[in-house]
Image: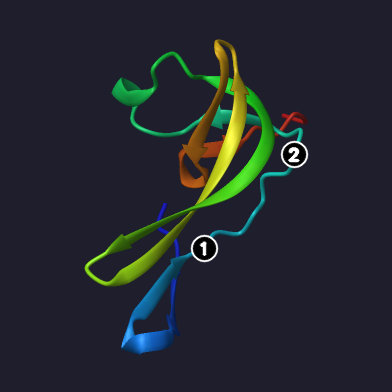
Amino acid sequence: MASPVATHGAMESTTVLCVYSRWSVKQGDLVEYAGLSYEAEGRTRGIAIRFDIYESQVLGHMLKTPLVEVLWEQGPGWIDRQRVVVIDENT
């Protein structure tokens, strides 16, 4: 699941790359871990409780990664938004 990347100009001729995602996850949604199974660390399903952006700089480019805090079975934890999917409770 690849995210689109937008390029924005910034001060001092530094290019800022902003990784964005459609925020289809809302606070209170039931979500399921969708990353690699060997990285799951016991996370299977949980409730989305908060959102944030992780900013990092790589080779002069600012990257922004959307995060979601999920209340997993074993407690709360932050995860990249792309590594969870909303569970459709109607199916």
Residue occupied by mark 2: 27
Q: CA distance from mark 1 to mark 2?
A: 18 Å
Badge 1: residue crowd in 10 Å (few <14, some 14–19, many ≥20): some
Against 78, residue 55 (above or below) is below
> Does residue 32 lie above or below 80 as drawn?
above
Q: Position of residue 59 (x, y in %)?
A: 22, 68
Question: Horizontal placement of 17 versus 38: left or right?
Answer: right
Q: Farthest residue toward the left?
A: 59
Q: Is residue 62 left or right of residue 22?
A: left
Q: Amino acid at mark 1?
A: Tyr
Q: Quadrant of residue 32?
A: top right
Q: Where does label 1 land, which residue?
A: 20
Where disc 2 sits, the SS reads: loop
Q: What is the x, y in percent for residue 82?
A: 48, 46
Query: Residue at horizontal 39%, vertical 17%?
Result: 41
The quadrant in which residue 64 appears is: bottom left
Image quarter of the C terminus: top right
* View extreme (front): residue: 12
In primary-sequence order, the first of circles 1 and 2 is 1
Q: Name the residue located 44 percent from the left edge and 13 percent from the top edge.
A: 42
Left or right: 13, with 11 as reference point: left
Q: Tell me what residue is drawn at x 75 percent, y 29 percent.
A: 89
- Residue 45 locus on image (x, y percent): 58, 21
Colour mapping used in the image: rainbow
User: Disc 2 marks which amino acid?
Assistant: Gln
